[in-house]
Amino acid sequence: MSQQIQGDPKAKPFTAPGGKHGKAMFFAGLAAMLAFGWIVFPYIIYKSVDQPVQFSHMTHTGDNVALTCDSCHTFSADGRFVGIPTIDKCATCHSQSKGVSDDEEKMIANYIKPHREIPWVIYSKQPQNVFFSHATHVKLGGMDCQTCHFGRIYTRDLKPALISRISGYSLDVFGKNLINAPYTPSRGMRMDDCSNCHHERGVKESCIDCHK
Ligand code: HEC
Ligand code: HEC
Ligand code: HEC
Ligand code: HEC
Ligand code: HEC
């Protein structure tokens, strides 16, 4: 009997329940949780919002229609950045259909004829506590638009914006640390991108310079 209390010399050393398989299962479980947290969860948080009209920058800034960026994205006389052009700008060329695409027809019927603005989705919209001025960067800083915006605007189709259901912010601005898919967000919009450049160029970089 005493031998049994002291333990069977042939008995295996203590292992976690399930032995080697237990360890494998633990790591499989961990991987599944991480995958859920990093990949699946963000997809649950972000809803996909389609652009109301498929508008192509490639078409409008190419050889055929060679508009410059600032012919549509203008600065007003007081230096404010106007942002996305109003429907009047589009109507100068699209008051009648050119028969180029279904989206052009849709745009004329739904927006130009009834004179309604197109509710474009903005990918780069910053949180409300961030102060950003185009005039400072483009006029004073002498920067090209492409310094901060590249990639997406030249692709033929406007990919749906991924907007967080919780914060209302776009994945391009807010989600890069969470996940870098399904497409690579344009760079130059995250806090690190802002402050890296400010640091390099010796521009003010204390919290209250950018946050209000
Ligand atoms: C014919 C007018 C027109 C011209 C010319 C034009 N754009 Fe646009 N731009 C738009 C419209 C309309 C949108 C909104 C739809 C979209 O996001 O593509 C837009 C959106 C954008 C956005 C997206 C902002 C965001 O975060 O959602 C950027 C950046 C931009 N334009 C930069 C440029 C640059 C750089 C050029 C010059 C190469 C240019 N645009 C030329 C009409 C124009
Ligand atoms: C200077 C004239 C001009 C202006 C201004 C203009 N467009 Fe166009 N647009 C064209 C021409 C020309 C085409 C056809 C180009 C082709 O098929 O090669 C076109 C094509 C389109 C199409 C078909 C799909 C595509 O993009 O190729 C859409 C949608 C469109 N434009 C929307 C807009 C919107 C929205 C605005 C205002 C922000 C606008 N356009 C301003 C000339 C213009
Ligand atoms: C230093 C970086 C930087 C440069 C340079 C820059 N942008 Fe932006 N752009 C931004 C940021 C950041 C936002 C988001 C602004 C916000 O949330 O108010 C933005 C937003 C936009 C939008 C969305 C519409 C709006 O009013 O919010 C358009 C269109 C745009 N930029 C076009 C341009 C064009 C055209 C140029 C060149 C004339 C340009 N940008 C230069 C950083 C930049
Ligand atoms: C590529 C470089 C670059 C990037 C990216 C950039 N900035 Fe700047 N920023 C500058 C420069 C250069 C100036 C100074 C311009 C001048 O006054 O000549 C400036 C000035 C500013 C100012 C004005 C500070 C003052 O003097 O009051 C603010 C606010 C600001 N940036 C916010 C931002 C934010 C927010 C972002 C990111 C969304 C950003 N910037 C991204 C280069 C950059
Ligand atoms: C050069 C501009 C700039 C400066 C300087 C800056 N921020 Fe930001 N900050 C931003 C922008 C743009 C965002 C939104 C995009 C993002 O979340 O990356 C942001 C987001 C944040 C957020 C939201 C949380 C998050 O997910 O990132 C916090 C908190 C924050 N900043 C705190 C600070 C503090 C504290 C400082 C000073 C040490 C500071 N910021 C300095 C531009 C700036």
Image (cartoon, rainbow, N blue to C red):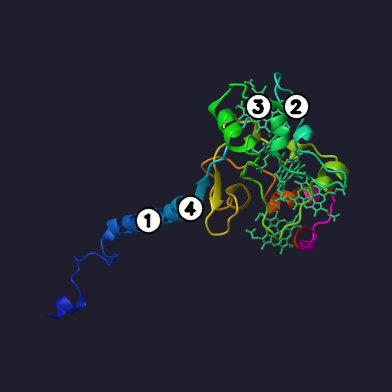
Q: Is residue 201 magenta?
A: yes
Tell which circle, 3 or 2, labels the residue nearer the N-terminal end. Answer: 3
Q: Is residue 75 magenta?
A: no
Q: Amino acid at mark 1?
A: Phe
For the point 27% across and 60% down, the residue is 19
Instruction: Sort mark 4 into few (<14), some (14-19) or many (20+) by Cα contacts within 10 Å.
Output: some
For the point 71% across and 19% down, the residue is 63
Instruction: Sort mark 3 into few (<14), some (14-19) or many (20+) by Cα contacts within 10 Å.
Output: some
Q: Which residue has dot 3 on it?
A: 58
Q: Amino acid at mark 4?
A: Trp
Q: Which residue has dot 4 on it?
A: 38
Tell which circle, 2 or 1, labels the residue nearer the N-terminal end. Answer: 1
Do the residues under discs 1 and 4 have CB atoms within 8 angstroms? no
Whole-angstrom CA distance, mark 1 to mark 4, is 16 Å
Q: Farthest left residue?
A: 1
Whole-angstrom CA distance, mark 3 to mark 4, is 34 Å
Q: Position of residue 169 (x, y in %)?
A: 60, 54
Disc number for residue 27: 1
Which residues, given as a range, are shown in magenta? 198-209
Image quarter where the C terminus lies is bottom right
Q: Above or below — where is 190 with respect to 92? A: below
Helix, strand or loop at mark 3: helix
Do the residues under discs 1 and 3 have CB atoms within 8 angstroms? no
Q: Which of the two discs, 3 and 4, sits closer to the camera?
A: 3
